[in-house]
Image: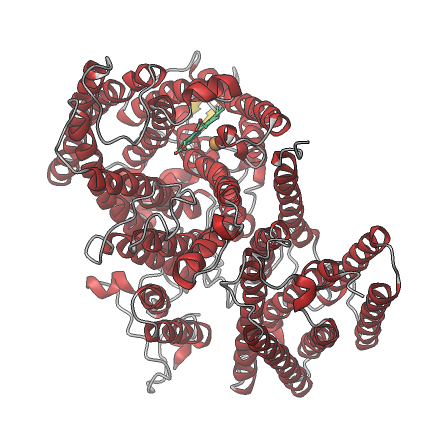
Amino acid sequence: MSAHVPAVPEAHEHHTSTGLSNNKIAIWAFLGSECLFFGSLISTYILYHNQTNGGPTAAETYNIPFTAIVSFVLVLSSMTAALGLLALQKGDHKAFRAWIAATALLGMIFIGGQAFEFTHLYEEGFTIQTSPLASSFFVLTGFHGGHVTVGILMLLGLLAMSLLGRLPQEDAHRAELVILYWGFVDIVWVIIFTVVYLIPTLGRG
Amino acid sequence: MVSTTLPVRKPRYLRRTAKTGLWSWVVTVDHKRIGMLYGATAFLFFLVGGIEAELIRLQLARPNGHVVSADAYNTLFTMHGLTMIFLVVMPMGVALMNYIVPLQIGARDVAFPRLNAFSYWVFLFGGLFLYSSFLLGGAPNGGWFGYAPLSTGDFLPGDGMTFYSLGLQMLGIASLAGAVNFIVTIINMRAPGMTFMRMPLFTWMSLVTSFLLLFAMPVIAVALFEMMFDRVFGADFFNVAAGGDPLLWQHLFWLFGHPEVYIMILPAMGIVSDVIPTFSGKPLFGYPAIVFAGIAIGFMGWGVWAHHMFAAGLGPVANSAFTLSTMMIAVPTGVKIFNWLGTMWGGSLRFKTPMLFAIGFVMMFVVGGLSGVTHAVVPSDYEQTDTYYVVAHFHYVLFGGSIFGLFAGLYYWWPKFFGHMLNETIGKLHFWVMLIGFNLTFAPMHILGLQGMPRRIYTYPGNMGWNIPNFVETIGALIIAASILVFIANVVLSRRREARAELDPWDARTLEWLTPNPPPEHNFDEIPLVRHRDELWHRKYAPTPEGVPTRIIAGGERTAADAPAHEAHGIHLPSGSYMPVMAAIGLPVTAYGLLFFPPLIGLGLLIILTGFFGWVLEPQTVEEGY
Amino acid sequence: MKEARYGDFEYEGRGHPEVRDYVQIAVALCVVIALELTVYYLLAPVALVVPLLGIFAAIKFFIIGSWFMHLRFDSRIFRRLFLSGLVLAVSVFLATLLMFVLATPPPRT
Ligand code: HEM
Ligand SMILES: [Cu+2]
């Protein structure tokens, strides 16, 4: 009996068939799957973009300047997330925590903005029951917001782990999971911004 | 260097692990135990789904039957379909994947053991949730594909289809988590030397299946969410009056649905591809071809979904395109058939029970594949769609195919699971009774379908010429039930009577048989070094100078003999954890909240969150927690 | 079999972005958003604006994926996993939407 390799895969096993981390393969596979999730929601929206059921149209509904600001916020948060990961990879835990906290904060601003937008639309009489357009709008952007919320929770989890001293430099790949997820959520917003907000409201003058 | 003397301090995390007793099964993260849980659960659901089927057949045995009411009949066929697909064939495949894949690739566990446990518990709770609908105001009754607008609240009020949308959602989450887990396991946890082109076919097909699940589950998830929002929150996705389009449901459902049928058949194909070489005494004929055929099926399975919608009025362009793609997908399927035949050709065949089931699989699957090609042709599909002909088709592929294949796997790996064989004589009896019962039940459906008997009617008048075939089918169904009783008898009797299985009872070819029966918790004392496809066979046989393979004494037998000597020394396995169960319980709580009592939603989400946070923060092993 | 330690910080030996890169990327993204808004508010013919907006979205998508999610530095296995989902999604949903167009009968006159 020779060299017994520890069998706890996530914690100690540094030798894998591909030399890559299990965690990262998992998250990329999952993000591939998410493409089909959001693909279905976005196609539903495209299919129904004119089905107003006599209710408000897209052009009458959305507030583009507001959404544009939200877009900037999200881009910024992707940057802070990436910088946070870089800091952890270099072993700078303080900077890591700062960037992660900033990212979570920007995420909360985004969610706050969405809450504001949703209440505003509800007051205007544009609710999930109004029309297929409204249903698909709320469910698509709502699921995106849900993803952002999960991302915020995970960022807070990272922060907690780091503060408890449970996130050493060599476990940066665990933090990377969250950062990659966050990047994906930003990518989805890129599509939503163009497909949901910009194109259907074009030329309303 | 084993650190056995740990300082005794209060653990920071309440682990409550156990190695024996009921609790040990609740917290287990061992892929073998999880596989057993999956298998046992799926088999129980198989009995329930079977009872539903028998009721359906009793109702249809004679014209103008009145065994059950029309309403009950709707519930029965819906729940029968859902059960067999989501609670039997899929999880039984997953059960075998769980137990066998890590052994076949020489790994000590799957990549994410706790995620694996989570998958199982979500599956279990999802199934129980679905069945709890019987007690809570009505089970799903809109067919397993839940077509809108029938499935909307306007046409099927009551909670049945809401249970459907939430229950399937949970089962989907379980499958998705499992898919990610197996993709990572197979890509990343292979023993040294286990290259992709040396992997056993069952592992290969599990990989393809996992990719199909990975990409198909999110699509049905969205469809189900849309249905749920329609039914619970009054959204308009499928509300025709408001401009919703029922075709959207059909597209999303079958975008998932067709990959789903391959999700159900590919594991069985993998099993058969491992069983047939073993009992033919030959390597698999055309290994690369059968692997690539499997991958091709996985790809092409995405391009045929609209063949379920030929009659929906998609227009001639779409119908022609999907006819073509559907016919093309029969090609890689045919390649596999020829590979199996080629493997048997000229082999020294041993007709043990697993082999019988594998051959039964090949024959029955050919019948189902051929009837599939006949309804790939639009004009003939217009005749056949929504008749018993389609029912015959998918039972030949799903029962004759998947279920026969899964039984081949159960008989083949039973000694691996339990350390003793299943009785051969009773096993053969089981096979023949089931084969006869199956064909009596489903072959006449081809004729009935072509005579125009629609599916999903709860009764029929006596003057249609349908009486005799229907009666024969019911007899057949009872014979199938008898065959299942034979199987259960076999399990019970073998447990008492059969001797311990030898190390390698079938003279098999793949790595899982390198371990003792059943394997120790850590599977392999030493991770094997793989030098060949069919590694185990090469460890047992070497060619003489004349090129004739002869049995040699080699490493194969050694492992078991040594096993007790050095048990898990220095091998750290992850400790049990109750976090996965906990997170999983949150899902049905949330779902009941959506149905009956909104505050439960918050509670459920809180439970899920607590479970996940505990999961992430708890150390992998108990030792680390001190 | 390769024995890379994945704790290592170099992505697949192809280096990694630095702080400055990330900031520049964020600026570039903001510029693209600004361009989008300009085009949205100023250009008239819809036939021209829609493809332009599509291109801008694709650029942003690409930049975020390759830099913030560092796909261009990382193993191609990740790229393939993600792209297989992406390409599959785009193809099946384009086909689906196309079928809705085809299935709509031409208006009767
Ligand atoms: C040679 C390969 C196959 C072809 C060409 C094929 C073709 C088809 C077609 C065209 C239909 C639609 C018939 C209709 O509704 O009018 C159909 C239905 C179906 N097929 Fe297949 N099929 C094949 C293999 C399989 C396999 C391997 C499975 C499952 C293991 C399967 C399961 C089903 C099921 C469950 C349905 C009916 C769904 C429903 O309406 O409830 N098929 N098949
Ligand atoms: Cu199909």
- Residue A40 on image: x %, y %: 57, 51
Residue pushed farthest right?
Answer: C43
Q: Quadrant of residue C4?
A: bottom right
* Residue shown at the point (61%, 66%) measured from the top left: A181
As rendered, which of C33 and B89 lies closer to the eye? Answer: C33
Q: How many marks?
A: 0
Q: Would you place residue B346 above or below residue B246 in this image?
A: above
Q: Answer with left or right where residue B373 lies relative to residue B454.
A: right
Name the image quarter holding the C terminus of chain C.
top right
As rendered, which of B9 and C25 lies closer to the eye? Answer: C25
Q: Quadrant of residue B537?
A: top left
Q: Quadrant of residue B109?
A: bottom left
Is residue B340 shown to the viewer in this render? Answer: no
Q: What's the colour scheme?
A: secondary structure
Is residue B559 shown to the viewer in this render? Answer: yes
- Residue B108 on image: x %, y %: 43, 54
Q: Would you place residue B117 above or below residue C31 in this image?
A: above
As rendered, which of B33 and A54 lies closer to the eye? Answer: A54
- Residue A180 on image: x %, y %: 64, 66
Q: Answer with left or right where residue B35 lies relative to residue B68.
A: right
Q: Answer with left or right where residue B530 lies relative to residue B281.
A: right
- Residue B281 on image: x %, y %: 40, 21
* Residue shown at the point (63%, 63%) measured from the top left: C6
